[in-house]
Amino acid sequence: MTETRFTAEELRVLCDRDFMPLKAAVSDKINQLFTELKLSLLEEINSSGIRFPEGLDIASGKFSRGENYRNFAWRVFDFPRRGVKNDLFIFRTLFLWGQEFSFHLILTGLQAEKYAPAIFNGWKSLADAGILLSAKESPWDWERSAESHREFSDGFGSAIPDFVASSGFIKLTCAISPEEYADVPAKGAATWRIIQNILFRS
């Protein structure tokens, strides 16, 4: 029978009485940060003058949390959102512990087909803002790399309809580091402003 042994680093964590209270305090502040983001998004939405599609939640949003995305804790705020199975429209703000704050537009099914032409036409605004197109096989894979995300450039947008046809989704992404946490409300609102102008003003 193998005897369990902790490494010195594991034992240090096991005995650390400060870690869990500190983690709880950090989690509360992330919740506060996402609440500030919600207010910034509401201001952006309400001042836009855009008549948004029926069924799109532009008032409430949804907060979620978990502890084990590939061993990392995570926090999510989905807003605006339209949650219909296999036909999703989600603007998601994600914090993946120790990695980054990221902002994502996720479109699946008919939503992806509907808005693909507008994204194609608006590629220049996306490129200027540093917003990337995910080339992952699933919209629910949150790890980023140079290979997994593509920059928009002249002519690249024409590949979007084919990508939607093969994958069934569109996912646009940009991110900031944890050190830039104070910028989350402004960055999230600015990213949504670009997206709403591309999708609903075109």
Image (cartoon, rainbow, N blue to C red):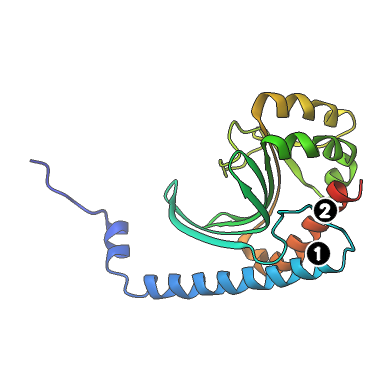
Residue 196: mark in rendering:
2
Relative vertical location of residue 178 with respect to residue 168 in this rendering, above or below = below
The C terminus appears in which quarter of the rendering? top right
Three-letter code, disc 1: Ile
* Residue named by callout 1: 45
Outermost residue on the left side: it is 1
Which is nearer the N-term, disc 2 or disc 1? 1
Residue placed at 87% from the left, 52% from the top? 197
Relative vertical location of residue 36 with respect to residue 112 in this rendering, above or below = below
Residue placed at 80% from the left, 26% from the top? 159
Residue 172 horizontal side relative to residue 47, left or right: left
Relative vertical location of residue 2 with respect to residue 164 in this rendering, above or below = below
Outermost residue on the front side: it is 54
Three-letter code, disc 2: Gln
Residue placed at 83% from the left, 29% from the top? 156
Q: CA distance from mark 2 to mark 1?
A: 9 Å
Q: Residues within 10 Å of mark 2 (few under 14, many from 20)?
A: some
Where is residue 93 drawn, in percent x and y? 64, 57
Looking at the rendered structure, the secondary structure element under dot 2 is helix
Q: Nearer the viewer, residue 12 or 40?
A: 40
Where is residue 184 drawn, in percent x and y? 69, 65
| Residue 24, image quadrant | bottom left
Where is residue 9 drawn, in percent x and y? 32, 58
Q: Is residue 4 visible?
A: yes
The N terminus appears in which quarter of the rendering? top left
